[in-house]
Amino acid sequence: MSQFKDSFIANTAAVRVRFGAGVRRMLGEEIESLGATRALIVTTAPQAAMAEEFAALCGSAAVGTFTEASMHTPVDISERATAYAKKIGCDVLVAVGGGSTTGLAKAIALRTDLPQIVIPTTYAGSEATAILGQTKNDLKTTVSSPKVQPEVILYDAELITTLPISMTITSALNAMAHAAEGLYARDSSPISTLLAIEGLRAFRDALPKVKVTPNDIEARGETLYGAWLCGTVLGQVGMALHHKLCHTLGGSFNLPHAETHAIILPHAIAYNRQAVPELLVPISELFGDSNPGMALYRFAAQMGAPLALRDLGLEEVMLDKAADLAMANPYWNPRPLERKAIRDLLQAAFVGDAPDL
């Protein structure tokens, strides 16, 4: 059966996407294609050496590096980075890294409207969206704007062969969450659904191979393909309970982004299955379990993903506050949010139990 709907809207952005092992070496060509001549390289402190490598790839176009990108994109860092970008007079941003780096480049672009070239080193998928999540005063909020949509994405499988397996797995599950929630998004389209299914399939097939052989270039390339598809879904439709919970836990309790997504995903899907079981059938079919929440939980466990929020440093006394925050200004969700049910969901995720089916 096709995914046809008799009425829908599909939004797509004009983004240039290049795949290929070694494609990062085309960076100078991509800068030139944008008509830019002054590039600022953005990354994190642990990737400072990589920033220098990419500055060399930019050649004479490189005019500076900023290596303070941080998890959840704190506004104070974004403002400092923006001031530096203006000071050096850059005309293009080159972001090399995961979601933290992409988020910082987007934050600078929001304030300057500079074009962005993103070279991902994880599977975050945020490079494929016009969405920026940023944190101020322990609250994470999101903004959507064409200004934050990167113009060019370079997916280079060589860059992620050394990504530690633990980070590989949690980052992949983070990306899969975009596709899983896209299946029941209120503004989904046949296109977003097809992208979601194909993205989940790519991770299902390639992630076990990467776990066994981390330097498998073909498998790594397929996981990047999955990340792009899942990220594109995130850029086309609105997210729901899963992302609300993860933004709450990340922004208010400073939990690591990808690990939190990995833990919450099966529980959020199980919660919403009660309202839209037919829309989650693709997950059951792909992962071989009639209960989609349990299907994702078992896949995560098989991959060796973290399963318990307490292992991330969250204290049990924080769960009531987390539930209250999740109920405040809730995202649209196919199943109404019920305070007790959300608190029970968080409790199961806290101890690492299988989702309540």
Image (cartoon, rainbow, N blue to C red):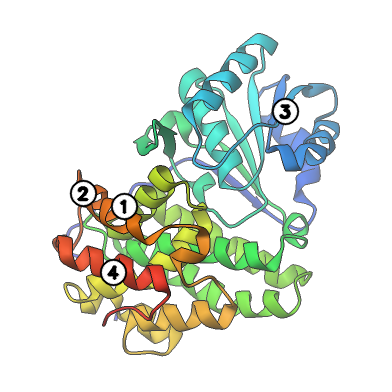
Badge 4 marks a residue whose secondary structure is helix
Q: Is residue 283 left or right of residue 91?
A: left
Circle 3 residues within 10 Å: few <14, some 14–19, many ≥20: few
Per the rendering, the mark at residue 244 is 1
Contact flag, marks 2 and 1 (Cβ < 8 Å): yes
> Is 27 placed above or below 165 here?
above
C-alpha separation, residue under disc 2 versus residue under disc 1: 7 Å
Residue placed most toward the observer, 291 or 188: 291
Q: How many marks on residues?
A: 4
Circle 2 residues within 10 Å: few <14, some 14–19, many ≥20: some
C-alpha separation, residue under disc 1 versus residue under disc 3: 39 Å
Residue type indicated by callout 3: Glu
Q: Earlier in the sequence, mark 3 or mark 2?
A: 3
For the point 36% across and 36% down, the residue is 144
Residue placed most toward the observer, 328 or 160: 328
Q: Which residue is mark 4?
A: 345
Give the label, 1 or 3, closer to the camera: 1
Q: Quadrant of the C terminus?
A: bottom left
Q: Which residue is mark 3?
A: 32
